[in-house]
Amino acid sequence: MEKIETKLKKKKITPPNKFIYCLLGYFWKFTVAKNYHIKATYINDPRNEKGPYILLSNHASRMDYIFTATPLLPHTFNFVAGYNEFFRSHLKGIFSLLHEIPKKNFTPDMYAVMEMKRVINKGGRLTLFPEGMSSISGGSQPVALGSAKLLKFLKAPVYVANIKGAYLVSPKYNLKERKGNVEVSFKKLFDVETLNKLNEEEITSILNKEIYTNDYEYNEIKKNHYKEKDLIKNIEQLLYKCPKCGKEFLNFTKDDFIECSSCHNKVYMNDMYELYVKDGRNVYFKNPKLWFDYERSEVKKEIQNKDFEFLEEVDIGFLDDYKYLKHQKTSNIEGNGVLKINHNGIFFEGLRNNNPFNFSLSFNETPTYGMCTDASRFYTFLKGEFIEFFPKRNSTIKWLLLTEEMHRLHNGRWKDYEKDESN
């Protein structure tokens, strides 16, 4: 019996069949996409490009394939998607049909790079999300390491889509989509000659500026309403720290509010994602992204202590070599143990399939984590093997922030936005 990974790597990716792609694309356009009233603006229309090209986009949500692809029909694209998603049974058929390209996020993947090059050489088009994963906080993050180098290697014109409002219809903390307005703009970013002239640092800086978004700031102006009964449900996955008493992992949500179970700081959210309080003694931020940024600032303070250490009991999940994951699963639990982070790196000690299992990761090889679905668990790659962590407490976001800021503190290459890029 052949391994799933072997099957993936044996497949030679070509541009998708235009009839099948457009049949599905127009179906989505006139059904699913109608929920989002997509307003497309074409500063430069990619459909005027006669040959192959690359479409980059900020990765605001799980629905971005709808927001980028349907406005550009009848053009077809090979999407680059997370490697681990190809092991999920409900995605197997559509990914194969549309010739999606598997990529191991935040780690080198030569197979993916060469298949992207194959598509371009055959006159096809690629859609890439250079952030590497959908938005956690409602704002974009800097592009992944190697993005500029990849564009220079592929040698094709580059267009960029900037999506606004997508996170508000499909937030990371809740898998239930909600109806609302989404806007997307398209423009040409580079021709091949310009790519050849610019160095990787210059390209990276331009990419960060062009994909930058903050959907909460966007909606401060637009005042769009997003009707959903459970709008705030599970937001404690992101907002884990109480801004009043400072305690962590004690927040919970109910109805239209988030509350700390220790000091009872209670903050409400309306259908424009605005936060507010009914009691002036409570502490809050005007939107969830500002709360998230506060948590990052607190993490930066914590790791200034040279003896800092954070531990968590976790279950660990892996992909099956031969069987596809069913029932929306993202991995199979094979063990448990203690995950630890300090200034020396990331460490795990525990069991896998009832046998001792230990490993360490450096901050150079682990700049951040991926999250397959919501923010209840996170993953990385261990010597090329997918591993997913299921923390016992609601600590996924703290792990994300700690790892990113430790990477940067210890001279990691993946930097945060320059100050002028987030204005």
Image (cartoon, grey):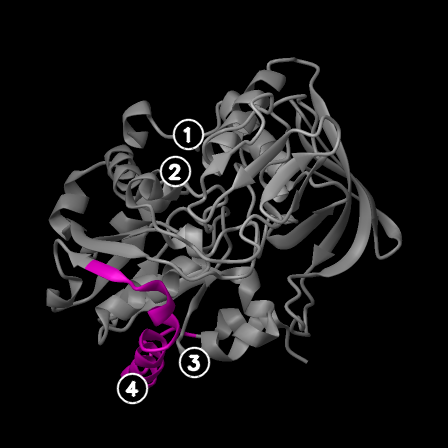
Judge left or right: residue 198 versus residue 1: left
Q: Does the magenta stretch include residue 232?
A: no
Which element carries disc 3, helix, strand or loop? Answer: helix
Mark 4 vs mark 1, foreground winner is 4
What residue sits 63% from the left and 68% below the top? 328
Neighbour class for label 3 at 10 Å: few (<14), some, many (≥20)?
few
Return the residue at label 3.
97
Give the label on residue 415, or none. 1
Neighbour class for label 2 at 10 Å: few (<14), some, many (≥20)?
many
Callout 2 amino acid: Pro
Check the image and report above or below for 340 versus 126: above
CA gap, disc 1 and disc 2: 7 Å
Callout 4 amino acid: Phe
CA gap, disc 4 and disc 2: 36 Å
Marks 4 and 2 close (CB-CB < 8 Å): no
Callout 1 amino acid: Lys
Return the residue at label 4.
19
Quadrant position of residue 385? bottom right
Q: Does the magenta stretch include residue 21?
A: yes
Return the residue at label 2.
142
Q: Which of marks 1 and 3 is nearer the N terminus?
A: 3
Neighbour class for label 1 at 10 Å: few (<14), some, many (≥20)?
some
What residue sits 70% from the left and 58% below the top? 318
Q: Can residue 115 be seen in this view?
A: no
Check the image and report above or below for 72 versus 263: below
Q: Which of marks 3 and 2 is nearer the N terminus?
A: 3
**In x, y percent, where is residue 50?**
11, 69
Q: Nearer the viewer, residue 49 or 235?
A: 235
Q: Give the residues in magenta.
A: 12-40
